[in-house]
Image: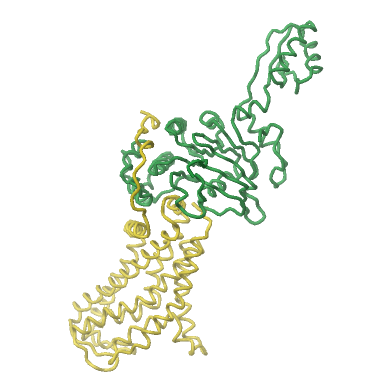
Chain colours: A green, B yellow
């Protein structure tokens, strides 16, 4: 059982009448991963997370948390913590009282971790105030504190930085990094792509309830190919060479410079061909695609109807 | 110091030794604590205390001999112990069902609506334990409300009309101490239909996921039973209506004790209450928690 990955999802489906909210999600989160779960609003991220935490029943497929099914028993959530959508608390009780309640529901000595958890999220000074008076950011931080009470090995966080000011978002990013450095596996649902690119090593990109990419961010970039910018002593001749050269794709002229997509080997061969054609290279530089560009290329190229995307795009590495 | 820097290594590195797992008792205790924080609790308990006091004040300021065609009305001037019994008679119509529904109808629905249900369901307590803890807390509140009402009525009634003997429904005179005992036994019997109202409230709370709908719905069902009881041609169903069971306590006020209405109250209330509780339980266990 200890060999089982922290999170393993197979063929997960959830329907609400005619609407297919989650359409066969497969993913595996390995120990130590900081796993970004990306998708536009309505893509099925939160529904998936609810099923992962056992809050709703899948129509098909399975979820395993360290090898155990959260639908069978709450014991599957041992070592697992997190929140779906905004963390929610009893507004008429103080932050500390809320944590006392949750610690009592956790057992396993969680009550002894309350003060440490409050300190960790810098809420000790407001812990005696009613949660009803907390700002959104304070509630998010209290949500993290509530998760830490469980001494988690796997954290599932749904949009933890949403609604925070820039300082709060920075702190949340640093906190996630720090927790990951402690060895906690983290699944981070988000549509803040810069945040995901900064903290995550692996991602799943979901669109219309279906995963269109799962794997390493670096692998995604590599699979998507690299965009290059080229400047030569004779751009007209260079343009013709580029268009004729095998392995050089999407050749365009932008802002007076030639751009194209190619892999390393093809670029090396192109540079030789340019010299042989008499177009001497002034500049040839890679322009790496950002996760945001890749995200949009994956999620905006889908079919416009309401059906899930039938097949992943070309860059899909699965 | 940033939030991240404040994370203590010990917080996430330490693995505690296993202790006793939380269960129904934990949930029950915290449900009672939560009730202490909520206004509706004090609204219900406040009404339980205020109604007997207002009733006694009304009798006091009205003055003169009291009479009527309902049980114990003529004894309001002669014994304070008649007050709780008269309140039991009239409270069955809507007051006690409403006070009971305030918590039973809200206890699941409000958590669903506010999103706190998903918070507690991702901890280490099983769903059935959470439901049982909530059901016990709703029942405890109803018991406290009825006993509080009765006790306040006894104290206020004695202050108004003294601690004197009562005439039973059979016409025999019952000493004051024995009457006091019968008042509390009657309150306990009264709890049988009240707990059925709790079950109805829990069912509607689990099914509707809407606090106001569950509270009003519970009251409406209670009133519906009253209505069926007075409809022409429905006389044969009266002994088996929930509303009728609110009068079962009167069996103790007869000499000798008439056990028939009390025994009937037990099985009739079980007939209504157990299916409602079962539906509530299954709905709570199988529900998708997506609110909040």
Q: Position of residue A147 (x, y in %)?
A: 42, 43
**Front-most of residues A148 and B272:** A148
* As drawn, A80 above or below A227: below
Indicate the position of residue B37 as horizontal and vertical percent values. Answer: 33, 56
In the rendered image, residue A65, in percent from the top left (x then y), is placed at: 51, 45
Question: Could you say which is closer to the camera, residue B152 or residue B21?
Answer: B21
Residue B93 figure quarter:
bottom left
* Left or right for A104, reference A201: left
The quadrant of the rendering that contains the C terminus of chain A is: top right
Residue A209: quarter of image: top right
Classify B143 as above or below A141: below
Q: Is residue B255 left or right of residue B243?
A: left
Which residue is found at the position 34% from the left and 43% from the top?
Answer: B16
Q: Is residue B228 above or below residue A42?
A: below
* Corner quadrant of residue B75: bottom left
- Counting from the top left corner in percent of width and height, residue B170 is at 29, 93
């Amino acid at each position: 059982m200890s060999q089982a990955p922290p999170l393993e999802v197979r063929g997960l489906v959830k329907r609400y009448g005619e609407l297919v909210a989650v359409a066969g999600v497969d993913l595996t989160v390995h120990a130590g991963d900081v796993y970004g779960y990306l998708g536009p609003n309505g893509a099925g991220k939160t529904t998936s997370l609810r099923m992962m935490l056992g809050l709703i029943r899948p129509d098909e497929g399975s979820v395993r948390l360290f090898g155990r099914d959260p639908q069978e028993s709450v014991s599957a959530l041992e070592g697992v913590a997190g929140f779906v959508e905004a963390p929610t608390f009893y507004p008429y009780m103080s932050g500390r009282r809320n944590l006392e309640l949750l610690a009592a529901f956790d057992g396993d000595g969680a009550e002894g971790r309350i003060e440490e958890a409050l300190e960790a999220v810098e809420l000790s000074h407001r812990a005696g105030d009613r949660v009803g008076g907390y700002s959104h950011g304070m509630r998010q931080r209290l949500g993290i504190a509530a998760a830490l009470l469980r001494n988690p090995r796997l954290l599932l966080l749904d949009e933890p930085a949403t609604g925070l000011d820039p300082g709060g978002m920075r702190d949340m990013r640093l906190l996630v990094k720090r927790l990951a450095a402690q060895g906690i596996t983290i699944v981070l649902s988000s549509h803040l792509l810069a945040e995901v690119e900064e903290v995550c090593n692996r991602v799943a990109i979901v669109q219309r309830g279906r995963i269109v990419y799962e794997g390493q961010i670096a692998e995604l970039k590599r699979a998507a190919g690299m965009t290059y910018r080229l400047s030569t002593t004779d751009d007209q001749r260079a343009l013709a060479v580029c268009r004729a050269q095998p392995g050089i794709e999407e050749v365009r002229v932008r802002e007076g410079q030639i751009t194209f997509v190619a892999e390393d080997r093809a670029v090396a061969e192109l540079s030789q061909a340019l010299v042989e054609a008499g177009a001497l290279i002034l500049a040839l530089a890679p322009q790496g695609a950002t996760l945001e560009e890749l995200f949009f290329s994956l999620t905006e190229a889908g079919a416009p109807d309401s059906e899930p995307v039938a097949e992943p795009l070309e860059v899909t590495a699965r | 110091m940033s939030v991240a820097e404040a994370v203590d290594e010990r917080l996430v590195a330490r693995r505690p030794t296993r202790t006793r797992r939380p269960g129904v008792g934990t949930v029950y205790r915290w449900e009672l604590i939560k009730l202490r924080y909520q206004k509706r609790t004090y609204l219900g308990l406040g009404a339980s205390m205020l109604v007997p006091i207002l009733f006694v004040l009304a009798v006091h300021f009205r003055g003169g001999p009291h009479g009527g065609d309902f049980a114990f009305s003529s004894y309001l001037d002669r014994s304070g112990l008649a007050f709780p019994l008269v309140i039991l008679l009239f409270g069955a119509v809507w007051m006690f069902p409403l006070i009971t529904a305030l918590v039973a109808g809200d206890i699941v629905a409000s958590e669903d609506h506010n999103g706190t249900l998903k918070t507690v369901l991702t901890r280490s307590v099983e769903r059935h334990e959470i439901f049982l803890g909530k059901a016990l807390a709703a029942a405890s509140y109803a018991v406290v409300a009825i006993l509080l009402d009765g006790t306040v009525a006894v104290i206020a009634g004695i202050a108004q009309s003294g601690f004197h003997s009562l005439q039973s429904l059979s016409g025999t005179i019952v000493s004051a101490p024995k009457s006091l005992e019968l008042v509390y036994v009657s309150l306990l019997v009264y709890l049988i239909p009240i707990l059925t109202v709790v079950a109805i409230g829990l069912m509607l709370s689990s099914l509707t996921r809407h606090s106001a709908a569950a509270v009003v719905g519970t009251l409406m069902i209670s009133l519906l039973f009253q209505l069926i009881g007075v409809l022409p041609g429905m006389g044969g169903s009266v002994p088996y209506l929930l509303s009728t069971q609110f009068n079962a306590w009167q069996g103790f006020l007869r000499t000798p004790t008439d056990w028939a209405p009390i025994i009937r109250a037990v099985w009739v209330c079980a007939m209504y209450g157990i299916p409602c509780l079962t539906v509530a339980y299954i709905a709570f266990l199988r529900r998708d928690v997506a609110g909040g």
